[in-house]
Image (spheres, rainbow, N blue to C red):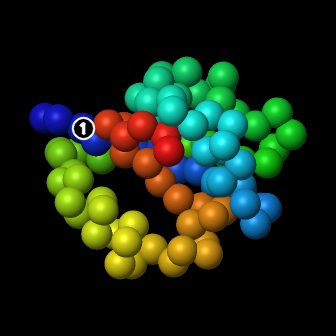
Amino acid sequence: MSKTRVLLVSGDGDFSVINFENAHGGTSIKDIMDNLDNYQSEDGEWNLEIREFDGDIDPKFVKFIKSKIQDYDESKNTTFFVESEILG
């Protein structure tokens, strides 16, 4: 059975995710997941966790969640990325 891996990025600061994206933009999420220790924040600004789910998740569903359900302001300090994405 296939698996879908998701990277959860969170932090206590108002812009933890944005700072993570600025520090590592252009990097594939798969590379980050495969080398998680290399991407952890040295000062604890963000926390990275890998979550794994059985089966495939439709990319259109992920886009729907991020655009219609996830709160924009909250997404600045907590969000997720699917393994197939490139960090913006």
The furthest residue to the left: 1
Would residue 87 appear left or right of 76 to someone viewing this image?
Answer: left
Q: Please state the horizontal and vertical placement of residue 53, each as a whole percent of the image.
A: 30, 47
> Seen in the image, is 85 located left or right of residue 31?
left
Q: Is residue 27 visible?
A: yes
Q: How many marks overall?
A: 1
Q: Position of residue 39 (x, y in %)?
A: 65, 30
- Determine which residue is flagged by label 1: 3
Residue for point 45% across, 74% down: 70
Residue positioned 49% across, 40% down in the render: 87
Secondary structure of residue under mark 1: strand
| Closest to the observer, 47 or 65 | 65
Res 25 → quadrant: top right
Q: Is residue 68 above or below residue 3?
A: below
Query: Which residue is farthest right?
Result: 43
Residue 65 location, quadrant: bottom left
Which residue does the image show at 66% across and 43% down from the upper left?
22
The reply, left or right, for residue 26 in relation to residue 85 is right
Residue placed at 18% from the left, 54% from the top?
Answer: 58
Considering the image in quadrants, where does the N terminus appear? top left
Residue 50 visible in the snapshot: no
Amino acid on which disc 1 is placed:
Lys
Q: Residue 72: x, y in percent?
A: 54, 74
